[in-house]
């Protein structure tokens, strides 16, 4: 089937939309992709509701912003069988068994006239899973699509980093040993927040500050001593799970602070590698962090192995997560699992997602 998916990530930059052809197991091809940035006032509305739960102040306004942006990017899209709507994560509390993605998929379905799959995380969490990350099954499909022979890793550097180790020789992503996935630690979010607070800019354009700054090794060492990095996966994080990071770099100039935060992100990934079943032959990087050459240099040094953007194997790192939710939507409609013990820690392979039909 031809399915669309969208992602509004923790960086709050905008809505990515992508179309794929899939049978819910294999990826057959890629269709149209679109991007709709959030306007500054929209981003401010969303940012004001971070950490809040349904019914709290400002949440309804944030949800409306998210829905309207998705409806705008969906306008005039060609014939699709379904749409996978992730919404905008405002709060994620795996220890408390709850998560909050703003946005009403039923409204989206009614307006666009297309079956919409949404609320992907709740079912997993109700059955004991972390509810994240959810892209790993799609990473498994991509490993097979690009013809990978041995285990490879997909590293997503969004607001939070997450890694998926996949064995493409396994016949299904939910089988034991097919996927291991977990959040590595903060990635772009602390950098973006600092640059926004100090300069009113959204991110470190072209990694200029990361490349200029001097890393404070002591801060990185204290950060990496956190118990999270020693905890066995699966495991997941909220966007603001390390609130002390900002205070630790508050006395540094902009470049040194950004470089130190980038080194923390790279170090967290290095720690994550110790939990993988087997060293991957290659690490493919997706998400906005791959556009930061300073961060990519730090990663290559920290991991001591090939690190390449997913474009090196013909994939689109800007649209990969949107594609993932198209893939998951297809799996939900076909009654296939969307997460498993190795990806979220759920007790058994389980399908998530609420379906709003038209």
Image: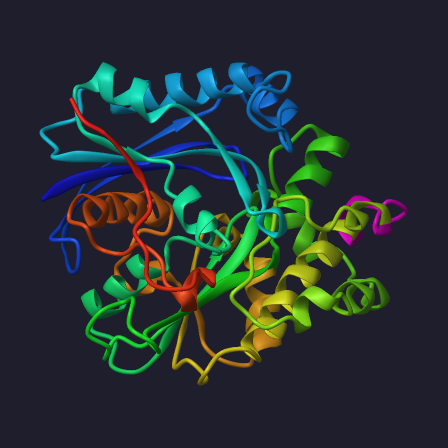
Q: Is residue 40 visible?
A: yes
Q: Picture coordinates of residue 276 (x, y %)?
A: 49, 78
Query: Residue 208 or 192: which is nearer the viewer?
Result: 192
**Quadrant where the N terminus lies?**
top left
Rendered view: 86 above or below 313: above
Q: Picture coordinates of residue 304 (x, y %)?
A: 55, 81
**Quadrant where the C terminus lies?**
top left
Residue 27 falls left or right of residue 245: left
Residue lying at 38% horizontally and 16% vertically, measured from the top left = 68
Rendered view: 247 above or below 50: below
Rendered view: 238 above or below 346: above
- Find the magenta span and give its range: 248-256
Query: Residue 242 or 149: which is nearer the viewer?
Result: 242
Residue 42 falls left or right of residue 230: left
Picture quadrant of residue 50: top right
Residue lying at 21% horizontally and 50% vertically, measured from the top left = 331
Picture quadrant of residue 110: top left
Query: Residue 223 or 24: which is nearer the viewer?
Result: 24
Q: Is residue 224 magenta?
A: no
Residue lying at 73% horizontally and 67% vertically, measured from the top left = 227
Furthest toward the right, the residue is 251
């Amino acid at each position: 089937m031809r399915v669309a998916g969208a992602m509004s990530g923790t960086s709050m930059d905008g809505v990515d939309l992508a179309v794929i052809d899939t049978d819910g197991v294999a990826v057959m091809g890629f269709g149209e992709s679109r991007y709709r940035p959030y306007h500054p006032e929209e981003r401010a509305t969303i940012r004001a509701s971070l950490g809040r739960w349904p019914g709290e102040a400002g949440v309804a306004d944030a949800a409306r912003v998210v829905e309207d942006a998705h409806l705008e990017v969906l306008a005039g899209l060609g014939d699709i069988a379904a749409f996978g709507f992730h919404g905008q994560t405002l709060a994620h509390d795996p220890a408390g068994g709850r998560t909050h993605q703003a946005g009403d998929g039923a409204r989206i379905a009614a307006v666009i006239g297309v079956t919409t799959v949404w609320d992907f995380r709740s079912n997993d969490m109700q059955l004991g899973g972390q509810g994240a990350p959810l892209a790993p099954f799609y990473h498994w499909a991509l490993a097979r699509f690009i013809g990978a022979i041995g285990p490879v890793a997909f590293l997503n550097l969004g607001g939070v980093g997450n890694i998926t180790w996949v064995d493409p020789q396994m016949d299904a992503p939910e089988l034991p040993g097919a996927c291991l996935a977990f959040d590595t630690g903060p990635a772009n979010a602390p950098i973006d927040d600092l640059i926004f607070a100090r300069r009113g800019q959204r991110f470190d354009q072209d990694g200029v500050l990361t490349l200029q700054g001097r890393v404070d090794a002591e801060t990185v060492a204290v950060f990496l001593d956190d118990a999270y990095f020693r905890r066995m996966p699966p495991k997941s994080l909220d966007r603001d799970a390390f609130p002390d990071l900002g205070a630790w770099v508050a006395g540094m100039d902009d470049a040194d602070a950004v470089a130190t935060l980038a080194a923390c992100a790279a170090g967290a990934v290095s720690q994550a590698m110790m939990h993988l079943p087997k060293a991957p032959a290659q690490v493919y990087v997706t998400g906005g962090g791959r556009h930061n050459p300073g961060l990519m240099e730090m990663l290559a040094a920290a991991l001591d192995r090939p690190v390449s953007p997913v474009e090196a194997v013909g994939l689109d790192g800007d649209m990969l997560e949107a594609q993932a939710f198209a893939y998951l939507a297809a799996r939900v409609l076909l009654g296939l699992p969307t997460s498993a013990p190795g990806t979220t820690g759920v007790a058994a392979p389980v399908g998530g997602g609420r379906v709003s039909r038209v």
